[in-house]
Image: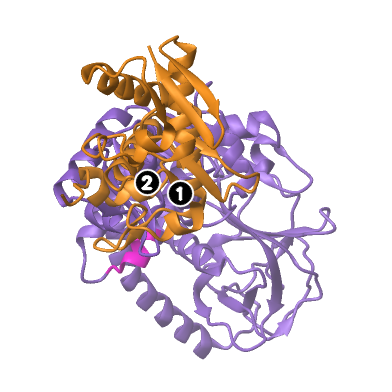
Chain colours: A purple, B orange
């Protein structure tokens, strides 16, 4: 912990915020640091930590000081951690929270999770080493090589260096996979500060191209079927999604109220196109809710916000519509979705089979039973079908009356 | 002659009261006509609701469907509105079924009377409904209340006159 220096929490000109995670406690080696729980922030140049309650208390360490790092799985009653091994502190180091430490490693304990993504991003940043390309104005202690006058256990350093080499090799594979990702970063056209908030530091990236490239990466990864499970694909898609879309629209970035809902509605408009088309142009609101929150990963939407955003589709001239059936079921459908076609095809299906229940119809079309029933009810409303309600269940027949 | 059931009778949805208004109208029309033709075939002039619920009209065992009690009431109400049914009691447990309206009966009777040149003769009601002469006629076996109404209709039309006699009523046709 003696590698840390006091910081003001502001990023430098060429420095970009990569990820932040709250609920993190620092450990000086194996011991808990004499600090409270805070927010850990990773930038392209540094690792920062700020006390959640006392925002004045902010410390940082330059990424070049990191030799290597590894995950430590959670245990019973213990949060998951990332262990970071550090180079010794340079002589000209600025003052920090600790003067001395008997440990050359620290731990980040993720009390509110988020360690997986943080680990990934840290890996990326350590691979890319942005600080070598774009040095920031503050003098950066490089921490490479022993300084005269400091005693050190050479053996440990040697081991640490070996481990670092090994890490670099494995990282090479990852960086090859992330080649596209660096292209991604290059395409960032604008980096904006939104402002220093008492709760968070924001960055907004605007690059439409990023979304295109991220889509191609997702497909590439999906093709590597052997190694990548569907779960990982989903997770990766969620990272990309949160990258390509400015820090998923949260109440913090855009405030609550209509403005927030407007942004959200636009985001949904983009996001739901493909899934809707896959499902024949219509999804129940609950299906949308699950899909959207799964993709977001963090910063989940509340059902209320989802509904309010969906109500804005029409006024924002988005190609989606929120629709409420007589029974109260709410769906999101593509504007291009033709109800007449659906009903005509429903009538054909029913006539074909003589009669159908909602379940049978759902099975036939690959729809959810709820949507299938709605469609049949609509066809009945239009007078194309009539119902047979008995102890055997509810069946629909072509309207021969 | 066994009763010929209409196609709807074997169509399961027929036994479920349809929510769609237009469909329901057609469905009820079919029910009304079924009930009336059944009663005509069986020469039923009155119906007991409870009995009717169990009858084959509202129960098709072959397709395991039956019309619910509520729906049967709806059908009866529909018949009443059309003038084919009259409740005999406040509880709606018995009703008169007029698969032919009094005016129509009256016309038939008068036609028979004229055809046989029996105008200006006086008949007792019994003679008309149960006499040997009328055996082949449709109105043979017509229940008294219906007969009376039919004659009243004719009377209103000026084609008959109901006469009160010592032991009942009689009628003279013009």
Within 10 Å of the Cα at label 1, are there few (<14), some (14-19), or many (20+) other Cα atoms?
some
**Does dot 1 land on a helix, a strand or a loop?**
strand
- Residue located at (36% from left, 65% from top): A232
Query: Looking at the image, can residue A47 be seen?
Result: yes
* Main SS, magenta residues: helix
Q: Which residue is mark 1?
A: B47
Q: Nearer the viewer, residue B104 or A137?
A: B104
Quarter of the image where the N terminus of chain A is located: bottom right
Q: Is residue B133 left or right of residue A300?
A: left
Which image quadrant for residue A194? Answer: top right
Residue A105 percent across, percent down from the top left: 61, 79
Q: Which residue is mark 2?
A: B44
Residue A219 vertical position relative to residue A260 in the rendered view, above or below: below
Residue A177 percent across, percent down from the top left: 28, 59
- Residue located at (26% from left, 60% from top): B63
Q: Is residue A216 left or right of residue B72?
A: left
Query: Residues in magenta?
Result: A228-234
- Residue located at (77% from left, 64% from top): A96
Q: Nearer the viewer, residue B23 or A307?
A: B23
- Residue located at (46% from left, 54% from top): B68
């Amino acid at each position: 912990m003696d590698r840390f220096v006091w910081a003001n929490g502001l990023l430098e000109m060429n420095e970009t915020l990569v990820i932040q995670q709250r609920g993190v406690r620092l450990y000086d080696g194996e011991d808990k640091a004499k600090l409270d729980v805070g927010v850990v922030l990773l930038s392209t140049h540094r690792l920062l930590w700020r006390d959640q309650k006392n925002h004045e208390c902010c410390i940082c360490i330059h990424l070049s000081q990191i030799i290597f790092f590894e995950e430590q799985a959670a245990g019973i009653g213990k949060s998951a951690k990332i262990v970071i091994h550090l180079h010794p502190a340079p002589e000209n180091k600025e003052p920090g929270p600790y003067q001395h430490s008997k440990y050359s490693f620290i731990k980040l304990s993720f009390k509110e999770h988020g360690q997986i993504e943080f680990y990934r991003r840290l890996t990326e940043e350590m691979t890319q080493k942005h600080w070598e390309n774009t040095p920031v104005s503050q003098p950066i202690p490089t921490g490479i090589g022993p300084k005269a006058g400091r005693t050190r256990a050479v053996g440990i350093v040697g081991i640490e260096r070996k481990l670092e080499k090994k890490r670099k090799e494995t990282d090479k594979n990852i960086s090859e996979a992330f080649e596209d990702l660096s292209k991604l970063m290059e395409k960032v056209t604008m980096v904006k500060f939104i402002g220093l908030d008492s709760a968070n530091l924001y960055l907004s990236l605007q690059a439409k191209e990023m979304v295109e490239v991220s889509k191609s990466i997702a497909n590439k990864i999906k093709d590597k079927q052997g190694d990548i499970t569907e779960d990982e694909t989903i997770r990766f898609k969620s990272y990309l999604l949160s990258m390509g879309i400015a820090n998923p629209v949260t109440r913090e970035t855009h405030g609550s109220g209509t403005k927030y809902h407007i942004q959200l509605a636009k985001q949904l408009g983009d996001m739901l196109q493909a899934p809707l088309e896959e499902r024949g142009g219509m999804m129940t609101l609950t299906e949308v809710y699950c899909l959207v929150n799964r993709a977001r990963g963090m910063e989940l939407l509340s059902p209320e916000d989802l509904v309010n955003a969906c109500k804005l589709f029409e006024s924002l001239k988005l190609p989606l519509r929120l629709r409420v059936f007589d029974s109260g079921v709410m769906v999101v459908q593509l504007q291009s979705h033709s109800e007449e076609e659906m009903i005509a095809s429903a009538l054909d299906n029913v006539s074909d089979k003589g009669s159908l229940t909602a379940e049978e119809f759902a099975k036939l079309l690959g729809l959810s039973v709820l949507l299938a029933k709605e469609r049949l009810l609509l066809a009945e409303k239009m007078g194309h079908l009539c119902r047979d309600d008995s102890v055997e269940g509810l069946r629909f027949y072509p309207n021969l009356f | 002659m066994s009763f010929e059931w209409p196609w709807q009778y074997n169509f399961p949805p027929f036994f479920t009261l349809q929510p769609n208004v237009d469909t329901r109208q057609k469905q009820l029309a079919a029910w009304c006509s079924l009930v009336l033709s059944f009663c005509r075939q069986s020469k039923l002039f009155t119906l007991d609701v409870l009995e009717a619920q169990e009858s084959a009209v509202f129960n098709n065992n072959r397709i395991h469907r039956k019309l619910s009690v509520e729906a049967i009431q709806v059908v009866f109400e529909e018949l009443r509105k059309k003038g084919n049914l009259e409740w005999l009691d406040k509880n709606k447990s018995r009703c008169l079924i007029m698969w032919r309206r009094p005016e129509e009966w009256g016309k038939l009777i008068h036609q028979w009377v004229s055809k046989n040149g029996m105008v200006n003769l006086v008949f007792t009601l019994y003679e008309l409904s149960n006499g040997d002469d009328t055996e082949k006629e449709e109105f043979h076996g017509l229940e008294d209340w219906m007969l009376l109404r039919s004659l009243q209709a004719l009377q209103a039309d000026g084609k008959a006159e109901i006469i009160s006699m010592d032991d009942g009523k009689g009628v003279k046709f013009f």
